[in-house]
Image (cartoon, rainbow, N blue to C red):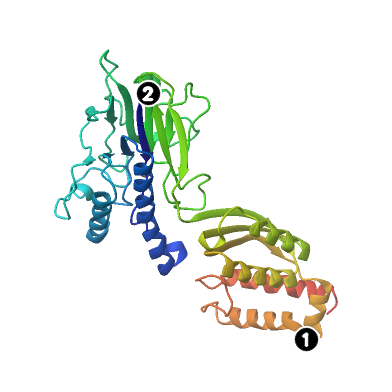
Amino acid sequence: MVKFLHTGDWQLGQTLKLVGPDRAEELRKSRLEAIENLLALARAEDVDFILSAGDNFESNQVSDGLIRKTITTLNDCSTVPIYIIPGNHDPLMEDYPFTRGVLGQLDDHIHILTEEEPVDVPQVNASIYPGICRHKKDSHSPIDWVPGRKPEDGVRVGLAHGSWQVLPELPDDDYPIAEDAATEKDLDYLALGHWHSTFSSPAESPQRTYYSGTPEPTSFNEGDSGNVLIVEIHEPKDKPQIVKQSVAKYSWAERDVGVSDEVSLEYIRDELLSLDVTPKKTLLNLDVSGTTSLEVVRLYDDLLDDLEDRFYFVRDDRTDLSLIPTDEEIQSISTGKGWLKGAVENLETLVADNCEYVPDGWPFDDPPKKEEAERALALIYTKVDEEGG
Ligand SMILES: [Mn+2]
């Protein structure tokens, strides 16, 4: 029996500007912790070896310090043999981090694969067939070179970084890997990297081509990241048995929320607080839509404040949220009272100053565009006019 751990897309050194410098630093640290976690899991599961399917680094320009830390982690956290290929983010070029050479010595159990040739795993009845990314883009399959099965072959494991042609509209220069590559090359398992969610295709029979996904999520649009795969293959040509294991520290969740009235806010709050995550370790992205009054938007802002206290990070996109003041809100302007009058005065000042500064309480880094502020004012004036205010 052959048992191994499949990982990839560590993306060490990811910049993450979106979350601000302090959180970005913490999240970068969590990526190395995920590596420690998966190395500990490999020991606990007593796997024969580990495969890493490229993009271990966000780019070849990562700092020397990060490369040293990565090498120390790999040297110290386990002695399980690990086989690593370059990916399109960290292609095998002069500055490929693992072969820069001056930044620390890799121990003997760490194998950086740099040639298109089979690698026999010592004391295990398995060979690895690596695909090597030598550029950021390429329109050839990285495993085109793999030879057919010979009678003496043990378990044949492909290891590659690229885009498996099972989804529509994939770019053709993104290291395409044919839909039937595992069958065509007679591989017992094809360990892929590049897509950050764990992925396989039920259309493949037997299923043996898998993306492990990144061990620590990298963005909001990943449905199933933060995992590694434990793979067992009893003998050549047997269907692999796969167990998915989470090793991530943080979760990234994305939700569409509809804002209409106060009840809708309670609904949003209930839904977000019942997510199956640890809020303090969760980044939340809300796509807000709906049409509502200014008062409800103010209550929504309060809800957002509350969520920001509970969750690690919260952001929202209000592009699809429309404001329509209620009759009372219009009235409160015309009678010169209430917070809406203050809002109108702030908007008027902002427009008069060409929107050159960020207003107090504005939730974004950049001020509103002048035409947006003018449109908001126009909307309110029109409404006031209609009400005969
Ligand atoms: Mn990639």
In the picture, the disc for residue 223 is none
Residue 181: x %, y % from top left: 38, 24
Residue that carries the numbered disc 2 in the rendered image:
188
Residue depth check, mark 1 versus mark 2: number of the one nearer the observer: 2
Amino acid carrying mark 1 in the image: Lys
Q: Position of residue 231 (x, y in %)?
A: 40, 32
Q: Quadrant of the C terminus?
A: bottom right
Q: Give the secondary structure at mark 1.
A: loop
Q: From the viewer's perspective, tell me whether residue 354 is left or right of residue 195.
A: right
The residue indicated by pointer 1 is 337
Where residue 192 appears, as percent x and y from the top left, is 38, 35
Task: Determine the secondary structure under disc 2.
Answer: loop
Looking at the rendered structure, the kind of residue marked 2 is Asp
* Closest to the observer, 249 or 92: 249
The spot of residue 339 in percent (x, y) is 72, 82
Work out which residue is located at the far left of the displayed protein and give it.
Answer: 102
